[in-house]
Amino acid sequence: MHLELTFKGGLLERYPEFCDVLRAAAYGCGRPFKHIAADLDMTASKLSRMLADNPNDPINFPADRVPDFIESTNDTRPALWLAEKFLVDSETVQRQAVAQLAAILPQVEALLRAVDR
């Protein structure tokens, strides 16, 4: 099976961490926070702690709840964030290869001149 995704990038710049995009989805979806928490079978307080990204609080958002979270918020940005982070398209691969070639081309030219001496 072949799946092709087309979307405009930029989520990684706007939301450097996955928790950032989760927070944006939760607080920007227009649904009461307590309803999102109820959809996830947790209290609003617990969900708030999970999304707070407090280094002194060991509670984290569980990965297995991400699909339910997306359904509850009706915001696909978390899934698109993951795709942007981990799926590399052929154009990106090509741009990276050209950049690497441009960086090493002077070294190759210098080596070829050294061999011709």
Image: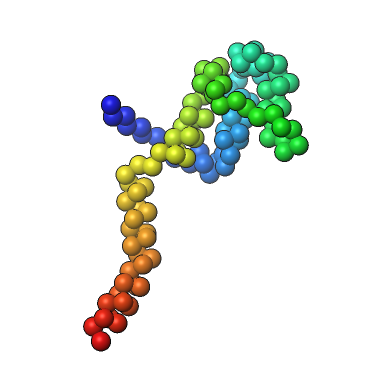
Q: Is residue 86 above or below residue 67?
A: below
Q: Residue furthest right?
A: 56
Of residue 93 and residue 28, the one placed in the foreground of this image is 93
Horizontally, residue 41 falls left or right of residue 102, namely right
Q: Quadrant of residue 100?
A: bottom left
> Where is residue 81 drawn, in percent x and y?
49, 35
Of residue 9 and residue 49, the one placed in the foreground of this image is 49
Residue at (31%, 72%) from the top-left corner?
108
Residue at (33%, 58%) from the top-left corner?
98
Q: How many marks?
A: 0
Quadrant of the snapshot with the N terminus: top left
The colour scheme of the drawn protein is rainbow
Of residue 34 and residue 2, the one placed in the foreground of this image is 2
Quadrant of the snapshot with the C terminus: bottom left
> Where is residue 114 drawn, in percent x and y?
29, 82
Q: Is residue 6 above or below residue 62?
A: below
Q: Quadrant of residue 23?
A: top right
> Where is residue 70 drawn, in percent x and y?
52, 22
Of residue 9 and residue 64, the one placed in the foreground of this image is 64
Do we see residue 31 in this rendering? Answer: yes
Do we see residue 8 in this rendering? Answer: no
Q: Is residue 7 above or below residue 44?
A: below
Residue at (60%, 35%) from the top-left corner?
20
Residue at (35%, 53%) from the top-left corner?
95
